[in-house]
Amino acid sequence: QWSFEKGPDRDELEVCGAPDDLTDLPEDVQVNISKIKEALHSCDETDIRTADLFFMVSAKPETVAAVCDELETDAIADAKMQLLLRSFSELKSEMSLINGVVFVKCALLPKVANLEEGTTARSLIDSITAFAQDMPHVTVEGLLVPLVSAESMGKAQTDVVQTLIKEGIPKDYAAMCLRRMLQESRTCIETNVTFVHILILKRGPLESVFTELVNWLASVKDERSTDSKFSKLLMDFVSFYGPQMSSACLDSVVKVVSANRTLLKKPIQNMLTKLTA
């Protein structure tokens, strides 16, 4: 059973079913799958036709998972992944959220998870970034959340996440991205500070996630009390979003800043004093 649960504090797509047996699919779909796989693993410039991917629009999520496993995308060349992403994104208006997420988790995530520092082509990052701009919700759930919730994240994967949230995720999706990362991230606090700061700098509408963000700031304030990067995050948060904060939210931020021991403490307190006057 596949479920998509959406709530104010939870936005989750879970995979709980076994992939379908591809031999049970209609013959024309099996032919399409063979054509896609051949194109992905060939050494020439064979394109991946959007028309050949169209069956995924009406397919069950289990079928999409099985097809992606069959395509063995973790072993394809970067240029082929670029073609696949570009063709798939052309189906964005027809594709369901869950099928899009399953595709990203099963086709793109293994490729990104296998990247090694210093060997990642900028062209691949650019194509993933373009895909994120076209299909941001799918990218957050299918790629970003699994990467940040992993036991450990390599330098190459950290760089991908950083680039995606900076250049790929539109600012209108910053709140959703921030909420999911705060809910699921298991990366070190230092890396999280970097990710959260980038999302704040996008200056998208974050009011809906103020509570979760301030709770997170409060949970790390003592450990990060001498961290200049954390202080800069606080300063930008108060500077950009202070006027939109409720009095209760501002009170919580005042407590976070009071634990700070960097040179930015006084300037941030001055800003807060003006906001609470």
Image (spheres, grey):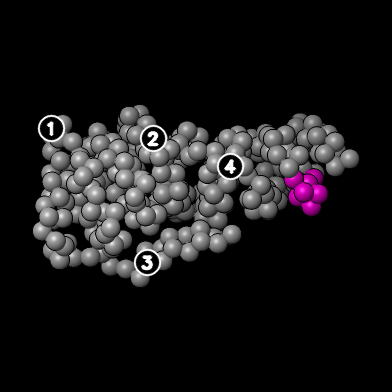
Residue bearing mark 4 = 196
Of badges 2 and 1, nearer the viewer stands 2
What is the x, y in percent for residue 210?
67, 49
Nearer-N-terminus badge (4/2): 2
Quadrant assignment, res 39: top left
Label 1: which secondary element:
loop
**Crowding at label 1, few (<14), some or many (≥20) Cα neighbours within 10 Å?**
few
What is the x, y in percent for residue 139?
41, 46
Q: Give, as a single range, the part of the protein colored magenta.
A: 245-255
What is the x, y in percent for residue 235?
71, 35
Decide which of 149, 99 is in the foreground and name it: 99
Label 4: which secondary element:
helix
Kind of residue at badge 2: Ala
Q: Is residue 134 left or right of residue 182?
A: left
Residue bearing mark 3 = 2
Residue bearing mark 1 = 44
**Crowding at label 2, few (<14), some or many (≥20) Cα neighbours within 10 Å?**
many
How far is mark 3 from mark 2, CA to CA?
A: 28 Å
Question: Looking at the figure, which quarter contains the C terminus?
Answer: top right
Residue bearing mark 2 = 130
Kind of residue at badge 3: Trp
